[in-house]
Each structure stands twice: as C-alpha cells, then as structure tokens.
Image: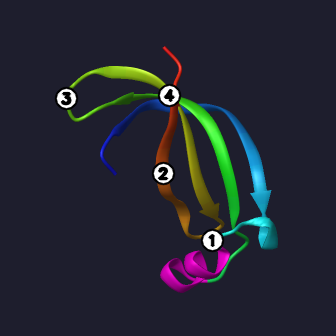
C-alpha cells in the first residue's frame, strides 16, 4: 500500500458480494476462502510525498481475513 490511512474510514458501502466480484477466484487463491465483499468508503490518507488528502477508497474484505487490496479511486478535495 503506497499510502497511510489517518483516522477511520467513513461512509462505508458494499459494492459487490460473492460471485458478483470479478476477482473472486484470485482473492480465494491469494488469501483463502471467505465471504468476500467489495466495499468503498471515504478516508483521509497521507501520501508518500507527505501530503494529506481526502479520498474515496475501494477494497476487498472477508471475515477473518480483513481488508485487502486497498486502492485510491478518486480524490475528494
């Protein structure tokens, strides 16, 4: 991950779950079985340059596995 989340992720919303996830086979192969969901939310992050920005994040999550493959989708400020 090339950024650090500062504070908490808010406005969390499920985008897809189960077989609706395109990368489901890859997630199961890399991280194991689980009830995988793709989520999005808003957070404040610190970029490698030290700049602090408010962003929309997308990630995958499964119970017992946690958040995986976080990525910045858009900058909100």
As measured in the structure, the alpha-carbon distance from the residue carrying label 3 to the one carrying label 1 is: 30 Å
Q: Are marks 4 and 2 in contact (CB under 8 Å)?
A: no
Crowding at dot 3, Cα within 10 Å, few <14 / some 14-19 / many 20+, comes out as few
Report the span colored magenta. Answer: 24-32
N-terminal of the pair, mark 3 or mark 1, is 1
Q: Main secondary structure of the magenta part?
A: helix
Crowding at dot 4, Cα within 10 Å, few <14 / some 14-19 / many 20+, comes out as many
Q: Assign a secondary structure to mark 1.
A: loop
Residue furthest to the left in view is 49
Q: Are marks 2 and 3 in contact (CB under 8 Å)?
A: no
**Residue for point 53% across, 19% down:** 76
As measured in the structure, the alpha-carbon distance from the residue carrying label 3 to the one carrying label 4 is: 15 Å
Residue 2 position within the rendered picture, expressed as x and y whole percent measured from the top left: 30, 46
Which residue, given by chain and number where applicable, does mark 2 sit on? 70
Q: Assign a secondary structure to mark 3.
A: loop
Which residue, given by chain and number where applicable, does mark 1 sit on? 23
Which residue, given by chain and number where applicable, does mark 3 sit on? 49
Q: Assign a secondary structure to mark 4.
A: strand
N-terminal of the pair, mark 4 or mark 2, is 4
Which colour scheme appears in the figure?
rainbow
Residue 52 location, quadrant: top left
Q: Are marks 3 and 4 in contact (CB under 8 Å)?
A: no
Residue furthest to the top in view is 77
**Residue for point 64% across, 83% down:** 33
N-terminal of the pair, mark 3 or mark 4, is 3
């Amino acid at each position: 991950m090339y950024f650090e989340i500062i504070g908490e992720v808010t406005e969390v919303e499920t985008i897809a779950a189960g077989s609706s996830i395109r990368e489901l086979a890859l997630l199961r192969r890399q991280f194991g079985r689980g009830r995988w969901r793709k989520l999005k939310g808003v957070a404040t992050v610190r970029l490698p340059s030290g700049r602090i920005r408010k962003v929309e994040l997308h990630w995958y999550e499964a119970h017992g596995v946690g958040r995986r493959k976080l990525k910045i989708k858009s900058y909100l400020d």
